[in-house]
Amino acid sequence: MKLTNLHNLLRHRFPAALWSGHPDRREIALTFDDGPHAVDTPQLLAVLARYDLPATFFQIGSRVASAPELTRTIAAAGHQVGIHGYWHRSFVVERRRVLRSQLSQTQELLAQVTGREPTAIRDVRPPFGQFTPATLQALAEWGYRPVMWSVVPFHWLQSADATVQEVLRDVENGSILVLHEGLGGPPVIELVQTLLPALIAAGYRFITVDEMWQSRSPAGKP
């Protein structure tokens, strides 16, 4: 099955999660997983500031605890912060009460570091994209919003050119693009420095995940 077909199947099967935005709006949500990272985070913030573009950073709680100043800088620059677990463990293998505690711990930590209300930090991207229907039900019960993606290049396993070509080929109206901090392969900053001007030239506008929840097609709402 092609990835696009699989994405559409999952999007229709699990509409409570955010898979993409409005198909008629030339908008992209640029997201970064696995941070904060001592090298990648400052570089990404610098290039985003240069183009005056927003992004959404899905943060790992244990890494925020080790480098709170990086997450504080992300928020101070006006970007959205979301939850990517506390230990980057699959939600599927965690016991329900443990998962709830870890999500709450990460939410409270992000709120403390950024100065934002805990209820404003409710977007959650499951590590590895792994979830079950029970996972989604639990997230909803606890007040979180599950966020997935539509474009996720394996940039740590291929060349920069291959990743850029893949993204420019697959991105479309409403795409949620995922890149990662702190992985091997070509530096993520090099990818972003190439992709941003190309996507801007193609007429795309960048929005946060929170804005994408508001703009997605009514048919895609749970």
Image (tube, helix red, strand yellow):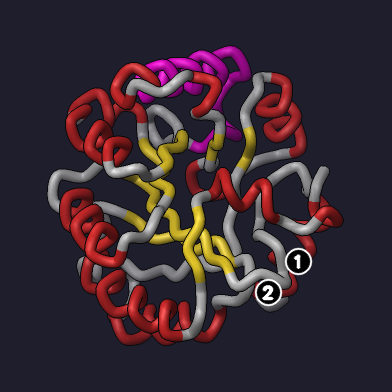
In the rendered image, the residue lying farthest to the left is: 39
Q: Amino acid at mark 1?
A: Asn
Residue 24 image point, x, y percent: 72, 72
24, 137: nearer the viewer: 24
Segment tinted magenta in the rendering: 90-110
For the N terminus, the image quarter is bottom right
- Residue 220 in the magenta stretch? The answer is no
For the C terminus, the image quarter is top right
Query: Does residue 184 appear anywhere in the picture?
Result: no
Q: Quadrant of residue 58?
A: top left
Q: CA distance from mark 1 to mark 2?
A: 6 Å
Would you say the magenta stretch is mainly helix, strand or loop?
Answer: helix
80, 58: nearer the viewer: 80
44, 4: nearer the viewer: 44
Q: Residue at x 63, y 40 (%)?
A: 146
- Residue 91 in the magenta stretch? The answer is yes
Residue 52 image point, x, y percent: 32, 60
Q: Residues within 10 Å of mark 2 (few under 14, many from 20)?
A: few
Q: Residue at x 54, y 49 (%)?
A: 209
Return the residue at label 1.
8
